Image: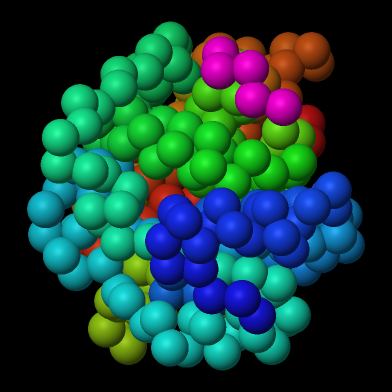
Amino acid sequence: MIVLKTIAELNQFNKVTRQNKVLGFVPTMGALHQGHLSLIKQSKLNTDLTLCSIFVNPTQFNNQTDFEKYPITLETDLELLKAVECNAVFIPSVDEMYPKTETLNHYNFGFLETVMEGMHRPGHFNGVGLILDKLFTLINPNKAFFGEKDFQQLKIVESLVKQNKFDIEIIGCPILREIDGLAMSSRNMRLTPDQRTEATFLYKTLKEAAVRSKNLNPYELKLWIENEFIQKTNFKLDYVEIANETDLMPIKNWDLNLKPRIFIATFLGDVRLIDNLPLNN
Ligand code: AMP
């Protein structure tokens, strides 16, 4: 696996190794798990060469503690990437990606950035836009792979590609879960053993909500989920939304033309967990 640490090395990779091959790109913030590796595997199935980036992007953290406590496991990450035969990894420094003299862009993602993560993490999607704009421009991949774990981010990325006219196919990939249903996440490493056991409540609630959606309207379903969380004192619910997959507009009734998906964000202790589940009513 080729390890690229600077933009100069990346440019050299594009010129020498890539040439005319179809390049798949998987951006990550490291602390890799099987969810990330599933994206690499998807890329390998659909392209000639796969490049993964590992960069804990400071501009997308609206909470300084979350940034400081974000797990870093670079050596293990590189071993995992080698094991799945990822072709190249880009691990730039913060100075490389954000030169001190640079003025930062501002992005407009319209309605998409006003709800859920956008509303609860001010500035988050602008940071996501900043780093992906840079990475897409530098790497210029043919395809880029994103997890539905961050479903709203996937929509933001599609919007960025459209607005900036990047010639990149964005491919959404399903959420990988632990055996007990918890969505894999780098932040799960920060849960205590007790919290890790309790964390399964999030997916269990989503699954039960899917069953209850047969008898409740979206408003009643949202209330039912909120009530379930009130009874779990270790959780602090950030939001529950039932929204349409295509535009993330809140859903008021089970209209057959809509594609409803439940979105939940919650704190468990000081670890923020997000998850989502499509409803096939
Ligand atoms: P992150 O390192 O958290 O920025 O995630 C990098 C990419 O991996 C994003 O596209 C995420 O949506 C994706 N990802 C994270 N967790 C999972 C998961 N459990 N299943 C599938 N994709 C995931």
Q: Residue 97: within the magenta?
A: no
- Please tell me how many numbered marks the rendered image carries: 0
Residue 152 vs 149, above or below: the answer is above
State left or right for residue 88 relative to residue 44: left
Residue 110, x across and y down, in percent = 43, 10
Q: Where is residue 59 in the image (x, y as percent from the top left)?
A: 25, 42
Q: Which of 267 and 27 is in front in this view?
A: 27
Residue 70 location (% of width, % of height): 26, 67
51 versus 83 height, above or below = above
Image quarter of residue 40: bottom right
Span colored in magenta: 163-167
Residue 165 visible in the displayed image: yes
Figure check: 62 above or below 111: below
Q: Residue at x 53, y 42 (%)?
A: 138
Residue positioned 30% across, 61% down in the render: 93
* The quadrant where residue 224 appears: top left
* Side of 264 relative to 181 (left or right): left
Q: Residue 249 vs residue 186: left or right?
A: right
The dominant secondary structure in magenta is loop
Q: Does the magenta stretch include residue 164?
A: yes
Residue 231 visible at all: no
Residue at left offset 71%, top offset 72%: 87
Which corner quadrant holds the N terminus?
A: bottom right
Q: How is the image coloured?
A: rainbow
The quarter of the picture where the C terminus appears is top right
Residue at coordinates 56% horizontally, 69% vertically from top-left?
A: 89
Q: Where is residue 237 in the image (x, y as percent from the top left)?
A: 28, 46
Q: Nearest the camera: 90 or 154?
A: 90
